[in-house]
Image (spheres, rainbow, N blue to C red):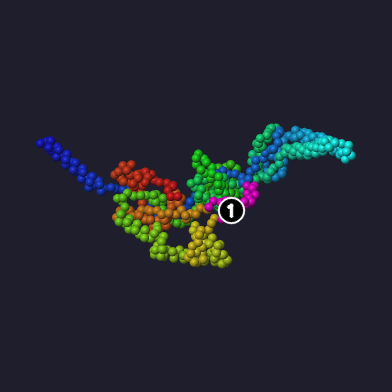
Amino acid sequence: MKKKLSLLGGGILVVIVACYFTFFRGNGHKYDFRYDKVSTGDISMVVTATGTVNPVISVDVGTQVSGIINKLYADFNSVVKEGQVIAQIDPTFLQQAVKDAGANLDKARAQFADSKRSLDRTKTLFDKSLESQLNYDAAVTAFESNAATVKSAEAALDRAKINLAYATIYAPISGVVINRAVNVGQTVAASFSSPTLYTIANDLKKMQVQTTVDESDIGRISIGQGVTFGVDAYPDDKFSGVVSQIRLAPVSVQNVINYTVIINVDNSDLKLMPGMTANVKVMVSNVINVLRVPNLALRFQPPPDLIDSADLARTRESFATRGGAGGDTAQGQTGAGGQGSDERRQRFQVVRDSIMKAHGGTLDSDELVAEVRKVMGMRGPAAGWANNTGATAPPAPVAPPPKDNSRFGITQVFPEYQKSAYVVSHQSGRARVWIMNAQGKLDPVFVRTGVTDGRFTEVTSQTLKAGDQLVLGATSNDTGADQARSPLTGQGQGQRGGPGGMR
């Protein structure tokens, strides 16, 4: 009897546990949500890199002759002018070489004069048939050979004089001596390569930053983009420059391909010094006062039991019918978005009229477009609004810096290849964010994405507005940590997210 009661009690306990997990635990999931709000603000898309500050033109001054450094006329930081004497190599052996070459020339000329007299005598006898043809030809050959010997001796003398002149070192450019590599009394040998005596920088008021950009970011770099950078020597100062050249030669660093980007910098205050390390930020795009959402909201994928399936089906059907995200179609523009378009058009017209009035109505169409963009903080077309046609025009290309035909000391006689400019609008895409409805379920909102800085992304939507609350993540409080990762947020339970995301 006791055994039967024990079995009956165990069975009842099993049934109770099964009912609990079936009716209570099965439908009793609870989630902790993370929220953030849709906001308006500025977004700057930048590419970061590290580079080195260098002079625009620097020349290593060497020597073509060997010898002992006899005198040095310039030291570190000396300001020199082009053509000034900056060093002298001991000319003793070179002067003797000139004398030796001169003596050889005198000897060659004497032999030439003797051969000429011999030829004249032989020719006189040959004309009287008193000398053979063989002797006459030999005299002609000796005369011509000695004439060539004279020319060779003259060339040797000129070469010796040139080597003697090379013993005096002149400044090839005007500038500042930033390095001196020799001392007085030191012997330099120019047998196989020219030894370096000085390094002269042309103009330290104009510098350049030579930086390497990773191949994943080089597509965003364009000629004429603005750059800001800092150096460790002046941690509180920010310097600015302009991208002037994107070199095609790849640089492999530990199997990672980089490309060299040259940035022109104005150094009128002479703070920057050659060799400084620059932490560079290239401004790719900057938008002002736009609707933005956290990148975590774009990456969040809720579990199926939190999604309002009926609303999701309606949203997908409506999204497919309109043909795009954020009401980008004709329906969105003529319907709910029509009023917003009218308001924007009126705002542009007010700005246009005020600009024209401020300039006395003297601006042409291109200048007016530029002023409208500047006032409105626009990154897209404004030509249609400026001329009150309502049409749009393609974005104005970034103007390259003025061409300097003698840049880097090279006279440019050939056209220069330039990489295609980066257009931000080509990188726009579609995404989805989630909001909580009155029933405690999540509804999707489809948006069109724009510029991102790694933390926030610009979005365009007819549904969202500033202050709307978005769901960034959800964590189930009755499942293990491993089960709460991927289905809810796509990342670790305790991970807060950070820069990155959409590119």
Instruction: Say if 351 sits above or below 500 in the image.
Output: below
Side of 12 relative to 319 (left or right): left
Q: Position of residue 278 (x, y in %)?
A: 55, 44
Q: Is residue 346 magenta?
A: no
| Quarter of the image with the N terminus in it | top left
Residue 62 visible in the snapshot: yes
- Residue shown at 50%/45% (left/top)? 214
Q: Label 1: how many residues lie within 10 Å, few (<14), some (14-19) or many (20+)? A: some
Q: Position of residue 340 (x, y in %)?
A: 42, 63
Q: Position of residue 420 (x, y in %)?
A: 53, 52
Write the start and end of the magenta stretch as one range: 399-420
Instruction: Say if 385 sits above or below 100 in the image.
Output: below
- Residue shown at 38%/56% (left/top)? 446
Using the rendered view, name the quadrant where residue 115 is placed.
Answer: top right
Q: Position of residue 363 (x, y in %)?
A: 57, 64
Side of 247 relative to 35 (left or right): right
Foreground residue, 145 or 356? Answer: 145
Residue 455 visible in the snapshot: no
Kind of residue sitting beneath label 1: Pro
- Residue shown at 69%/38% (left/top)? 63
Using the rendered view, name the quadrant where residue 109 is placed.
Answer: top right
State the residue position of label 1. 401
User: Under tag 1, what secondary structure?
Assistant: loop
Foreground residue, 158 or 355? Answer: 158
Using the rendered view, name the quadrant where residue 144 is placed.
Answer: top right
The dominant secondary structure in magenta is loop
